[in-house]
């Protein structure tokens, strides 16, 4: 009788122990599932917010360079919005009025002249490329063929008037007053042996004047649409005038903006160097 009772009690204890273990396992499993689904701290989501910067520009190669670096800036969390303008006044007006964050179309002397005239504070961030300024003709095959009294078409803004006169002086067509430099004007011509006659027009209309002049001075951006190259077709070409490098500009109040500094970094990168060397051979990097 005692043996039977002992066996029954032992069996009962085993059953209860098994149930307890099962409940504990179930509870642990349930707890683990809860931790995996809800109780565990959620992973932080990576921010996908982009910083947008607006840059005013003119047609190629300026806008082409911006388009080149645009996808690279996405990797830096920056959305580049390119605002293409139709003349060479609008980009500075837009920048001065804070309608854009930067512009890319001009050299430092041009920006300085604008500042003096408008009381603005446009400043350089990054020189990007030098463009071979040159004189072209559809009437003459060499500079020696220029007749007495030849008509020379030049831009009508003071910095590019100076650029044109320096180009002519470098090629022995005129002489300028000593020290005139990048501020030179027509009044600074001290010698003009061919009696050149100067006609000033808007920078963006220079390439339309080829049939009306003996010589037209212009940048590669305006010569290329005519199929002209400074190295192959120009009668005269400038020699190392790096003061006129085409430069990324901002304002004094935002020149240290991190997004603009990253843009400047991308614009002096190897992709831009390769583009200039392969696509715009009348230019060379200014960095």
Image (cartoon, rainbow, N blue to C red):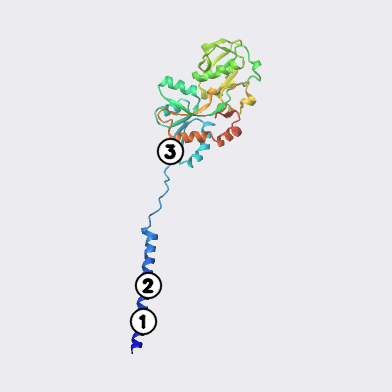
Secondary structure type for disc 1: helix
Q: Which of 22 and 49 is in front in this view?
A: 22
Residue position for label 1: 10
Q: Which residue is drawn at 51% across and 11% down?
A: 187
Secondary structure type for disc 3: strand
Q: How crowded is mark 2: few (under 14 residues within 10 Å), some or many (20 or more)?
A: few
Expressed as whole percent of the image width and height from the top left, the position of residue 50 reads 43, 42
Q: Residues within 10 Å of mark 1 (few under 14, many from 20)?
A: few
Q: Which residue is drawn at 39% across and 63% down?
A: 32
- Circle 2 or circle 3, nearest the eye: 2
- Circle 1 or circle 3, nearest the eye: 1
Q: Which of 239 and 229 is in front in this view?
A: 239
Query: Between marks 1 and 3, how big is the CA–CA gap?
Result: 77 Å
Expressed as whole percent of the image width and height from the top left, the position of residue 259 reads 44, 36
Query: Between marks 2 and 3, how big is the CA–CA gap?
Result: 61 Å
Residue position for label 2: 21
Q: Is residue 74 above or below residue 213?
A: below
Q: Residue at x 58, y 28 (%)?
A: 283
Q: Which of 7 and 253 is in front in this view?
A: 7
Residue position for label 3: 52
Q: Which mark is residue 58?
A: none
């Amino acid at each position: 009788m005692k043996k039977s009772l002992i066996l029954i009690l032992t069996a009962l204890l085993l059953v209860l122990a098994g149930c307890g273990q099962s409940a504990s396992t179930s509870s642990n499993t349930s707890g683990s599932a809860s931790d995996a689904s809800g109780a565990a701290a959620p992973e932080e989501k990576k921010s996908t917010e982009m910083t947008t910067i607006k840059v005013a520009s003119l047609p190629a190669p300026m806008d082409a360079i911006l388009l080149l670096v645009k996808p690279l800036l996405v990797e830096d969390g920056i959305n580049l919005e390119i605002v293409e303008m139709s003349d060479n006044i609008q980009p500075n007006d837009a920048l001065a009025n804070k309608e854009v964050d930067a512009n890319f179309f001009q050299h430092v002397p041009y920006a300085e002249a604008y500042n003096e005239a408008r009381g603005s504070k446009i400043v350089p961030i990054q020189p990007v490329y030098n463009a071979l300024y040159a004189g072209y003709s559809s009437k003459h095959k060499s500079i020696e063929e220029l007749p007495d009294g030849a008509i020379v078409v030049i831009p009508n803004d003071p910095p590019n008037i100076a650029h044109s006169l320096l180009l002519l002086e470098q090629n022995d067509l005129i002489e300028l007053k000593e020290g005139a430099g990048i501020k030179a004007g027509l009044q600074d011509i001290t010698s003009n042996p061919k009696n050149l006659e100067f006609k000033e027009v808007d920078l963006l209309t220079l390439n339309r004047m080829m049939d009306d002049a003996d010589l037209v001075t212009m940048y590669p951006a305006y010569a290329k649409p005519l199929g002209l190259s400074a190295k192959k077709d120009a009668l005269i070409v400038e020699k190392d005038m790096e003061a006129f490098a085409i430069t990324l500009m901002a304002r004094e109040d935002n020149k240290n903006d991190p997004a603009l500094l990253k843009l400047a970094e991308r614009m002096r990168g190897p992709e831009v160097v390769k583009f200039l060397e392969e696509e715009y051979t009348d230019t060379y990097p200014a960095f």
